[in-house]
Each structure stands twice: as C-alpha cells, then as structure tokens.
Amino acid sequence: MMNDQSDLSDNKRRVITLLKKSGPLSKGDLAVRGAMGWATAVKVIGQLTEAGIAERLGTVRGDGGRKGKRAYLYGLTRTNPLAVGVDVEYRTTSMVLTNLKGETLARKALPTVNPTSDRAIRSFLHKTIVSFLKIAGSSDTVCGVGIGIPGIGFPSDSRLDNIEKMRDLEVRLSDRLGLPVRVSDNTKAYAVFEQWSNQTFPLEDFIFISVRTGVGSGIFHRGNLYLGNHGLSGEIGHIPVVPGGIPCRCGNRGCMETIVGQRNLFREYSERVLGNPENMTEPDPRVIQRGLADLFTRARRGEEEPLKIVTVAAGHLGRCLAMAIMVLDITNVVVSGHFGPDGDVMIEPVRAAIQENLLPGSVFTVKYLPFDPLGHVQGAALLILKDYFIDMRTAVL
Ligand SMILES: [Zn+2]
C-alpha cells in the first residue's frame, strides 16, 4: 500500500531517522536516542512494523533494552517506501529506484534529449520514467519521483524562472504519472544527499559547493535548504570574477565557474600541462575526470604549472566563499568535485583565500568531499524520501 508521509507523526519520523542514521537499533536504543518514553518507542516501532516500513531483524544480548534481557533489533525494510530519483545532466540522464536506506534496487542511464524546450524535456522525462518503472518492476510502494535538473539555461529557451520552471514540471509530470513529483536543481539535490546520507556529516548549517561543469551551491540553515524567491539561491558560480573574461552560459563573462568549473580546469590542463590545444569537440565526462585526477595529483607533487592552475581556481573560489560567509554568517563549507584521490589539495589555498577576505579573527571550516558516484541521483530520490526524516538536533541527548 502506498504510504502517505503527511500522516507520519514526529515520533515516527524520529524513529525512521534513527534507524537510517544509526540502525539497526533496539526499542531501548530508540527510546534513549530519540528522547522518548519506553511506551512511545514500543508503540511507534509497532506501528512502523505493521506499515511495512520497519522490521524486526533478530535478537542481541541487550544492554540497550532492559537490563539482563535479550532485546530485538529493528531496521528499515528494503521495499517500503520506494522512490525514483532522476538526475538530468546535459549529456546523461541517470535514474535509480531506491529505499529509505539509500540502497540501489534498480538503475539506468541514457543520453539526455536536446533541451530545446520545456515541452521536449517534459515529454522526455515522462517517457523515460514510465519505461524505467516498468523495467524496475516496482510495486505500489513507490511514493514519488524526485528529479534534479541543471538550473540556469535549461531548457535553453525557457523564459520561466527556476522556481516556476520546476513547479510547472512537478505539476504536469505528477498529473501524467499519477505520483507526487519534486524537482530541484541537481546541486541542491546532491546537497540533500549529503545532509541525510553522510554519516560523518551531521551539520545543520553549511554551504555545500558542487564543482561539475557548472559551479553551484546549496545553502542549509537549521537543516533547511534555502531556495530564494526564484530558486536561484547559491548561484555562486555566476559571481563575476574576471571583468570581460570567458563568456559564460548565463550570458555574462568571467563568472567564477568559467575558471573553476571542471571543463575549464580540464582545458587549462590540456593546453598548459599536456600541450594539447583545445579540441573543439566536447570530451567524454570520464576523460575529463581522469584528466582532473592527474591534474590534482601533479599539483600535490608540487609540479609548477598544475599547482598554479589549481591555486588560481582555488583563490577565486575562496574569495567568492568569503563573500557568501560574510553575507550569510554560515561558517561551515563543504566542497565536492570529481578531482580524484588528491582533490583535497585545493582546500588549503581555498582556506587561505577565505581567511584573507573575511573579517579578522573569523572562524570557519572548509573541507573537501569527493562526489559519491550515486549522490546526485540518490539526492533526487531524497527530495521525496526526506519527508520521512526529521531534524534530530532537539532530540539527541
Ligand atoms: Zn555565469
């Protein structure tokens, strides 16, 4: 049976969140960690088990339960609820069927249609999702479809702003699919993935920077993603940093992403380190990722030209981040990219550039996390599944 997550009480969300972040757990663990009474924990886990969302896994000699007794452990089930996540990139569209645990039950990737109009994108997504649902053999436990799309300039002729474009797509696709649909830009979808799936990253206030072809960010305040009036919050990649510089897809010149975006880093690496003049054809994303991994490894070894390329890019990124930190007063920054095992070599120059441009004595953190290969598509599914979770800050002792 399809779940209606709007019926979930805060206690149910609390138990589901604990099972996702720290499961499997006993009723005793849930009562303590969820700061709820024993009777409440027993009742809630009973209801979730009956609804097919949680299941009893076996016993453990429990100190989490009542002393001296064996306590049953509970976990989330694999099959209820499920959600479809769709990550639309300019070249490739990836899909996943997943559950509350973030397991991949089915996946598929195909070339993205040429994004000439809202209508072309809508009909591409409708066909693609319908055929995926058939192949995935999913049941009526699918509770919705989450979609991440590129923000600015997608589709190319769209005159709607980001929020209107995304709400329009949600309403029309939801009508045709008969399922709830949520759409966000893919950087924000990835940021939601970090928020809920990264066990070592429990921050509620952070700026997440994604460096792919574009450079975008997700701004979280008290656990909530800030969207802005037009869904254009966090477009840090379009801050102009080089007057009259390289033309950007947004229509301006010299935007930060024209320097820091992976396409430009790869071009600089090809031309200045490998001595290959820019090839007009768009390289395969895997070629770009391998090239960037080499670039960052060479920078770590201290090779002059690679280090210069990385340091200049990191300087621009750091100065833009300093502005964001000063405006928002959010002082934790996470940078993600496809930069290979030495990707964190950029963090020190980013940190230095932030420090130099902030108010004296300001305290901040900045760290690098390589992209999880499934993070964008899992994050898209979490646009739906996150309704099952709750902010635990007030509940954790
Ligand atoms: Zn731009």
Image (cartoon, rainbow, N blue to C red):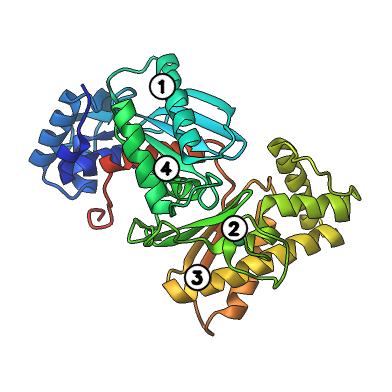
Q: Secondary structure at mark 3?
A: helix
Tell me whether circle 4 and circle 2 mark residues in contact (CB < 8 Å): no
Q: Nearer the viewer, mark 4 or mark 1?
A: 1
Q: Which mark is residue 197?
A: 4
Q: How many marks?
A: 4
Which residue is denoted by mark 1 in the rendering? 130
User: Which residue occupies the foreground of this view, 198 or 220?
Assistant: 220
Cα separation, mark 2 vs mark 1, equals 32 Å
Cα separation, mark 3 vs mark 2, equals 20 Å
Cα separation, mark 4 vs mark 1, equals 27 Å
Q: Which mark is residue 250?
A: 2
Name the amino acid type tagged 1. Answer: Val
Q: Nearer the viewer, mark 3 or mark 1?
A: 1
In this rendering, is residue 155 above or below 214?
above
Q: Residue at x 53, y 44 (%)?
A: 155
Cα separation, mark 4 vs mark 2, equals 32 Å
**On the rendering, which quadrant does ligand 1 occupy?**
bottom right
Q: Which mark is residue 324?
A: 3
Query: Residue 379 sits in which quadrant?
Result: top left
Q: Position of residue 54 (x, y in %)?
A: 24, 28
Residue situated furthest right in the rendering: 275
Tell me whether circle 2 and circle 1 mark residues in contact (CB < 8 Å): no
Q: Secondary structure at mark 2?
A: loop
